[in-house]
Image (cartoon, rainbow, N blue to C red):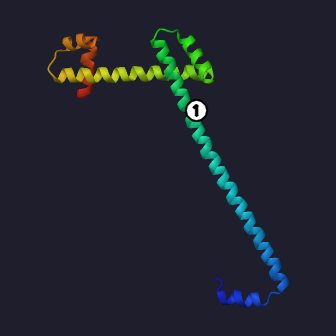
């Protein structure tokens, strides 16, 4: 470890010219470290901006898939709906189709979750499996299976 006294003694032995040379060297090193820090900061900002843009693009694709799904629900052919949304949004057709399928799966999962909740609620209220099947428009065996799975049997 170097003490401040030894630095003082060492600096007393250095000539004025050597002091300027060392000062120039350390200034050059400091400038290099500043440039390095600026570059790292610039890359960090660029990466954050790219992540924001990527998030926005993913969100646009999800919305495009949902819009195409809504068009299909209203009676338009899937291919025509996806092509129309792709044209409107400028998103590639293949991405609209993929997100259409995702929206379709999400809709089916939500439907199943809602149906399961309704079956369980009706079961807890004392309705028979046959009556629940009629009310939920599904088979008696599906009602019984759902009840068993929810009870953990």
Q: Residue furthest front?
A: 88
Q: Which residue is more in the foreground, 48 or 136?
A: 48
> Residue 29 in the image: x percent, y percent?
75, 68
Q: Which residue is more in the foreground, 67 or 124?
A: 67
- Examine the image and state in which quarter residue 95 appears: top right
> Residue 64 in the image: x percent, y percent?
54, 23
Identify the residue under disc 1. Answer: 57
| Quadrant (top left/top right/bottom left/bottom right) for the N terminus | bottom right
Is residue 54 shown left or right of residue 21? left
Q: Residue at x 39, y 23 (%)?
A: 109
Q: Residue at x 36, y 20 (%)?
A: 111
> Residue 118 in the image: x percent, y percent?
25, 21
> Residue 30 in the image: x percent, y percent?
73, 68
Q: Residue at x 45, y 11 (%)?
A: 74
Is 150 located above or below residue 56 in the figure? above
Q: Which residue is more in the foreground, 128 or 149?
A: 128
- For label 1, count other residues whose C-alpha is less than 10 Å away and answer few (under 14), some (14-19) or many (20+): few
| Quadrant (top left/top right/bottom left/bottom right) for the C terminus | top left
Asked if residue 50 can be seen in this view, the reply is yes
Is residue 74 shown left or right of residue 40? left
Q: Which residue is more in the foreground, 43 or 7?
A: 43
Q: Residue at x 61, y 44 (%)?
A: 49
Q: Residue furthest left?
A: 126
Is 96 located above or below residue 72 in the figure? below
Asked if residue 153 can be seen in this view, the reply is no
Count of numbered badges drawn on the protein: 1
Determine the secondary structure under disc 1.
helix
């Amino acid at each position: 470890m170097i003490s401040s006294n030894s630095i003082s003694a060492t600096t007393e032995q250095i000539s004025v010219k050597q002091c300027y040379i060392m000062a120039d060297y350390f200034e050059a090193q400091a400038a290099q470290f500043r440039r390095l820090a600026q570059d790292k900061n610039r890359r960090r900002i660029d990466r954050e901006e790219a992540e924001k843009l990527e998030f926005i693009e993913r969100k646009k694709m999800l919305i495009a898939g949902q819009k195409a799904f809504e068009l299909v629900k209203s009676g338009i052919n899937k291919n025509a709906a996806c092509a129309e949304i792709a044209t409107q949004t400028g998103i590639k057709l293949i991405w609209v189709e993929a997100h259409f399928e995702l929206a379709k799966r999400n809709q089916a999962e939500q439907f199943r979750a809602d149906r399961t909740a309704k079956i369980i609620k009706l079961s807890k209220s004392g309705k028979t499996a046959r009556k629940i099947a009629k009310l939920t428009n599904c088979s008696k065996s599906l009602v019984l299976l759902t009840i068993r799975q929810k009870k953990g049997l």
